[in-house]
Every structure is written in structure tokens, then in C-alpha cells.
Amino acid sequence: MSQTAEPVVKTSPPALREKYHCLIGGKLVGAESGETFPSFNPATGEKLADVPACDARDIDRAAQAAQNAFPAWRKLSPAERGTYCRRFAERLRARKDVYAALDTLDLGSPFNMMRVDVASAANQIDYYAGLGSELKGETIPSGAQTFSFTLREPFGVVAKITPFNHPIMFAARVAAPLVAGNTLIVKPAEQTPISALEMVHDLKEIFPPGVVNVVSGDGPSAGAPLVQHALVRRIAFTGSVEVGRAIMRSAADGLKTVSLELGGKNPMIVFPDVDLDRAVASAFNGMNYTWSQGQSCGSTSRVFLHSDIHDAFVVKLLEKVKTVRIGMPIDEKTEMGCLVSEQQFNKVMSYIEIGKKEGAKVMIGGGRPSNPDLQRGYFVEPTIFDGVEQRMRLAQEEIFGPVQSIITWNDLDQVTEMANSVMYGLTASIWCRDFSKAYRMAQEIQAGFVWINDSSKHFLGVPFGGYKQSGLGREECLADLLSYTQVKSINVNVS
Ligand code: NAI
Ligand code: MG
């Protein structure tokens, strides 16, 4: 495959490479053990490629390479580091269709939306590339005899561990640690490693050797040693709460700085005064049925409907969901693809069974689509439960699939309490025309990212991250860039 902008034929698979490599110290390498593991297309069950199965030895090589590259990289100005990052963003845009098609094949999300993921990563890189001058310190008045000032310095080697649900979008977001002067090791999820291993060819051409390294492998063999490696001082993780906890525990031994972007069971609270069509569209978009089949941490998976509008809202939402075109993800006309793996499929199907047993009512969906062409893949229909109650697991646990629960409310205090009574606190969507009411609720909601009369959208510069067990730290903003630095205070005796 060529490295230049070359539109692929969008409805046919892109050329997969004969062989996939990691990138360590500027070299394309396999695992030292020679081991590989397969990655599958979840829409067809076909094997796409074998990729390196890295273990602690490869992690050690990558950490040494990143450490060796660090002194020269940190000496560049932030603007120079930003220029490297911008070139990478340009390359992502030029090869957008290649990256998008690889993610579509490896993950099962619709091609058109994977193009949006690539563009989003590129835009985020440009954003941080332009923020280098904000890596500034302070001067502090320490009296006439002393000049006190601070510097923001990089940590050294940063590890970035990413989940399966938006593979290239997460793996390619390299700019915050790099512009801050760190070097980087990226480990993509084992279900969807291919786009990150395609990315190594662009990284290799653009960055000095060792500045960005990419290793593939699973959690226990590659992720855990990466977190534990003595040279790794800062860890950025996106994924499940369970693994987030394990990483934090393990990082405690080396007292490493950790940021965690974890799951959500996000409420959308609809007041009776809303424009129903807009609110319904927002409930639909917020669930990310047509982006990730609901496999996104910010999805509005709990919809709290005021009893006055409950029935009309549900009718409209079902009408909307009925129109979704489920199909082969690589087909440009497809709006909704399949889940990433058999494991994820079984998890979602088991929650659907749990919901039924608990007494909630399936209003639409609840199984595989009947289309005979889709029977080999992990397809699940968009599924809406009504009559969900707070005590049900359906109302408490993150399903990470196309399953949305409807809960009816009448009392403002009660709905706020219900919205808050889960262990998560990532996003919330409040639909209400009366701004003072909406704002009052926004203040009471335990979530790190709240929309009023909207859902789903992110905005560069606006901090994204979780309350409670949805995570630690904020991304997509200046604070994220600064979180890749540590402060040094210097005090000069000027007497
Ligand atoms: P996961 O948390 O198991 O894996 C995410 C990443 O962590 C992968 O790269 C994995 O290899 C790595 N990892 C696993 N164990 C590790 C360890 N001990 N040390 C270091 N790294 C380790 O998430 P997975 O399996 O992809 O999805 C499971 C569930 O996690 C989903 O069903 C969903 O509930 C949640 N999730 C939330 C996401 C979010 O965006 N907040 C994204 C993906 C998953
Ligand atoms: Mg795969």
C-alpha cells in the first residue's frame, strides 16, 4: 500500500499488509519471541491478519528506545514538536480512507463513521500542536532577595493504552504527551490492533526514532508490563473500570501519574416542556447506535422520560430506530455495523436476557437482525427496554452495546437521585427549555461532562472526563496537555 493520499475503492476492503510490525526505536519489528496472534473481522468471522504478540521483553525494548529518544526530543521547542505532530495529522487526513477501512474491517463499525474518527484524531493533534506556548510556568514573589519561577517539564516516557471501540481515533491521539516533550509507547487493544500497526509506517517516516513506539499484545502480556516498567512515568488509559483499577494499583508501586478514561451509564433526563422531535433525535444520536453500535463510554444508555411525554416520546424513538440500516460495515450505505467480538456479543445478549428476566419490556430489537447476509457476524439489533426500574442491573451496569433503557419519572428530586445512583459519572444530557431548571439540575448531576439540550458532541478545548468511577483526569483540553508535565520550581538568590 502506498503512503500517499490514495482514495481506496470505498466499498471494497483495502489491501491488508502481508505482515504487520510493531515500531520500536524507529524499526519495524516483530515480537522477540516470534509469537503472533490473529485479529478477526467481526462482521464475517474471517481472519484479517496475524500481529506481533509482544511480551515484557518487547516492552523493555520499547521503553529503552523511548528513553533514548527523550533527551533530544525534550530539547526541541514546543513549536518544533508541534510541527512534527502536524505533519502526522496531515498524513492521517491524506490516508483517511485507508485508516477508516482498516478500522471498519477490524472493529465492525460503519466506514463513514470511521472516517470521522480519523478526522477527529487529526483535528485533535492540530489543536495540541498549537498549544505549545501554553507550557509556561509562573513567577512567584518571594521577596527582594529571591527570584522564584517554575518550569513545566515532561515526565519522560509515557504509556498510552487504548480500547477497542475507536481504534485509530485513540491510538493516533499522540500530540498531548509529545508536544509536552515526552516520548511515547502506544498499545492498542488486542481486538483491533491493525490500524495502529498501519500507523507505524507513517510514524516511522515522520518522527525521529524512538519518539513514538507502538507495541501490540493483550492486557496481561503487554499491557501489564508496560504499566510496571520502571522507565514509564506517566500512564494514559482508556477502557474498562476493572482494568483502570488494576492499572492504578500497579502504578502505585512506582508512584506513577495515571489518567483514566473509563466507562459510563449515562443519564439523559427529559423534561415535559421539550421539542419532542429534537429530544428524540438526541436520545438516538446520544446512544451512538450509528457510530459504534453503542460501544462508546459517553452513550446515553439511560433515558429518563417525564410521564407526561413518555408515551409520545417512545413512539417517536421507536420510529427513528426502525429506520436504521444495519449492514456490512464496509458498505458505505450501512448505518450500523456489528459488535467487536464474540465476547462482547455474548455480554450484550446476556444483558438483554437479564433485562427481560428482571421484568423490563423489549420495545424493539432484542436479538440478531434477520438479514441472512449478517448471520456470520456479531450483529445485534438496536434494542430499547421500557419500564426499567432503578433496582435492575439494566439501570446500573454498563452494557457497552446497542441497548437503551427507558425509566419514567415525575418528581425532580427523585429523578436527580436516580440519575446519580450509579457508580459511574461520565456524561449526562438534560433536555429542558427552562434554562434555570436545566442549569439547577446540571449543578446537581454527578458527571464530568453535561449537555443541556444536546448529546454526544465533544468540543476541542472543553474538558472531557469522569466523576466517581468513570475516571481520573480531563482530556481534550489544555489541562490534558499540562497533565503530561511536572512542575519544577527554581529559586535564585539575587542578593
Ligand atoms: P479493557 O479495559 O479490558 O481493555 C482496554 C485496554 O487495556 C486494552 O488495550 C487491553 O489490552 C488493556 N489491558 C487489559 N488488561 C490490562 C492490564 N492488566 N494492564 C494494562 N493494560 C491492560 O476493555 P475491553 O476489553 O476492550 O472492553 C471491556 C469493557 O470495558 C467494555 O465492555 C466496556 O464496558 C469498557 N470499555 C470502556 C471504554 C471507554 O471508552 N470508556 C472503552 C472500551 C471498553
Ligand atoms: Mg478485530
Image (tube, grey):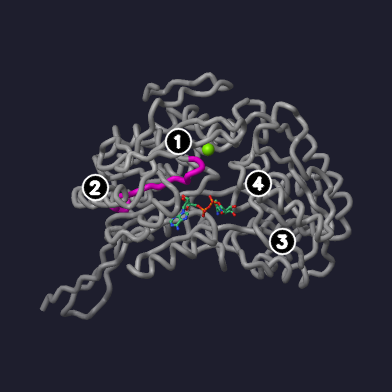
Q: Position of residue 422 (x, y in %)?
A: 66, 67
Instruction: For the C terminus, give its image quadrant.
Output: bottom left
The disc label shown at residue 65, or none: 2
* 277 is higher (above) or lower (below) than 100: below
Q: On the rendered structure, is 299 left or right of 185? A: right
Q: CA distance from mark 2 to mark 3?
A: 53 Å
Q: On the rendered structure, is 79 left or right of 361? A: left
Q: CA distance from mark 1 to mark 3?
A: 43 Å
Whichever of labels 2 and 1 marks the residue nearer the N terminus, that label is: 2
Whichever of labels 2 and 3 marks the residue nearer the N terminus, that label is: 2
Which amino acid type corresponds to the residue marked 4 in the rendered image? Gly
Q: Residues within 10 Å of mark 3 (few under 14, many from 20)?
A: few
Whichever of labels 4 and 1 marks the residue nearer the N terminus, that label is: 1
Q: CA distance from mark 3 to mark 4?
A: 29 Å
The disc label shown at residue 435, or none: 3
Mark 2 or mark 4, whichever is nearer to me: 2
Q: Are marks 1 and 3 in contact (CB under 8 Å)?
A: no
Residue 292, visible in the rendered structure: yes
Q: In what element is the residue under mark 1?
A: helix
* 201 is higher (above) or lower (below) than 388: above
Q: On the rendered structure, is 306 left or right of 2? A: right
Which residue position is annotated with label 4? 294
- Which residue shows up at 28% across the image and 61% down it? 230
Which residue position is annotated with label 1? 195
Q: CA distance from mark 2 to mark 4?
A: 38 Å
